Amino acid sequence: MLTFFLVSGGSLWLFAEFIILLLEKMQTQEILRMLRLAELGDVGQFFHSLSATTLMSMGALAAILAYWFTHRPKALQPPCDLLMQSEEVEGSDGARRSVVGGSPHLLTHYYSDARTMYQVFHRGLRLSGNGPCLGFRKPNQPYQWLSYQEVANRAEFLGSGLLQHDCKASTDQLIGVFSQNRPEWIIAELACYTYSMVVVPLYDTLGPGAIHYIINTANISIVIVDNPQKAQVLLEHVEKELTPGLKMIILMDPFEEALKDRGQACGVAIKSMQAVEECGQQNPHEPVPPNPNDLSIVCFTSGTTGNPKGAMLTHGNVVADFSGFLKVTEDHFLFIVL
C-alpha cells in the first residue's frame, strides 16, 4: 500500500485535496460516522488492529499532507482594493486613472533615459550587454536571434539608405510599412526612429481603397513591403493613377526582374531591402534622434465605416503606453516574432 501511495503521486495529491475539502466541510465525528469507525468504540483499538504496512502508509500520507500545508503557495495580495481600482482625475471632466501608480500625475515615462522609442531601444542595448533582441522562427523550428547590436546596425544602414534615396531626417518624412509581423518590420520602424522619420503602418485587412487613401493622405513616397504580391497591389494603384506620389517600393523578400521592369514603366523604383541597407552601409549618416514631442507613428483605422481616420502618436505618447511593460521587465525588452 505504501508503494501505491508513493508511485501514484498525481492521485495522491488529488486525494489530499479531497481530504482537505472534507475537513473543511465536516466535523470529525461526522467523518468517523461516515466511515463507521465509531462502531469500534475505541479509536486506539482501531489503530492497533491495523497492519504495520497500513500504518506506515497512513504516516506517509500524513507527512505529505503536513508538507503540503506548510509549503503550499500563499494567496497573492491585490495591489489595491479590487472594488476601487481607479479614481477620477481632478478637473478632467470624468477621466479616471489607476490607483496603483501611487501618484495623481499621469505616467509619461518610467526611465529618464528612455523618453523616446529610440532611447528605449538603446537602453535595452546597454543593459542587455548586446543580448538577444529579435527572435524569429519557421514552423516547427527553434528560434533564431538577432542581437541588439545587429538590429541597431541594420536600422542605421536602412535609415542611411533611405536618406540616400531622397528621404529627409525629419518628422515631415512619412514612411509606409506594408508587412506582416517579422524582424524586418521592427528594423524598418527603428530605422525611421533613428532618423526622426514617421512610420505609417499598412496592414492586410485594409481594402485597396483604404490603402491608396492612406498613401495619398500621408503623402507617402516610399513603402516598405514584405512580399512581391503586395508590391503588385501598390503598382496597380500607381498604374491607375490613384497614388501618383508613390515613387519607391522596398521589398523584404526576393523578387523577379519583371517586377522591377513593371515599376520602371510607371515611374516607381523597386529596390530590395538588402540593397538599401548596403547603400546605407557604404554611405553612413549620423543618427538624428527624435524628441519626446516629435511625431513617431500614424495609425489609420480600417475604414470600414468610411475613409480611414488617422491617429497621430508622439514618441512621448508611445513611451507612456509602453512604460507599464518597461516597469515589468525593469531593464530592457525583447521583440519575439512568431
Image (tube, rainbow, N blue to C red):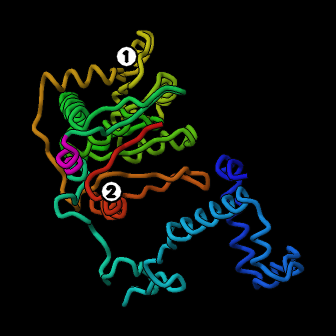
Q: Does the magenta stretch include residue 127?
A: yes
Q: Is residue 96 visible?
A: yes
Which residue lies under the disc numbered 2?
A: 329
In this view, the residue farthest toward the bottom is 90
Mark 1–mark 2 Cα distance, whole angstroms, equals 47 Å
Q: Where is residue 314 in the image (x, y as percent from the top left)?
A: 29, 59
Q: Which of 255 and 119 is in front in this view?
A: 119
Secondary element at image label 2: helix
Badge 2 amino acid: Thr
- Disc number for residue 276: none
Instruction: Indicate which disc, 1 or 2, sits on the residue closer to the N terminus.
Output: 1
Which residue lies under the disc numbered 1?
A: 264
Badge 1 amino acid: Gln
Residue at figure coordinates x 45%, y 35% from the top left: 179
Where is 36 relative to 290, above or below? below
Q: Magenta stretch mostly in which secondary structure?
A: helix
Looking at the image, residue 127 sits to the left or right of residue 54; the answer is left
In this view, the residue farthest toward the top is 257
The magenta segment is 122-129
Residue at figure coordinates x 68%, y 66% from the top left: 17
Q: Quarter of the image holding residue 319? A: bottom left
Q: Nearer the viewer, residue 308 or 161?
A: 161
Looking at the image, residue 126 sits to the left or right of residue 86; the answer is left
Secondary element at image label 1: helix
Q: How crowded is mark 2: few (under 14 residues within 10 Å), some or many (20 or more)?
A: few
Residue at figure coordinates x 68%, y 63% from the top left: 58
Q: Position of residue 91 (x, y in %)?
A: 37, 90
Q: Is residue 141 magenta?
A: no
**Mark 1 vs mark 2: in front:** 2
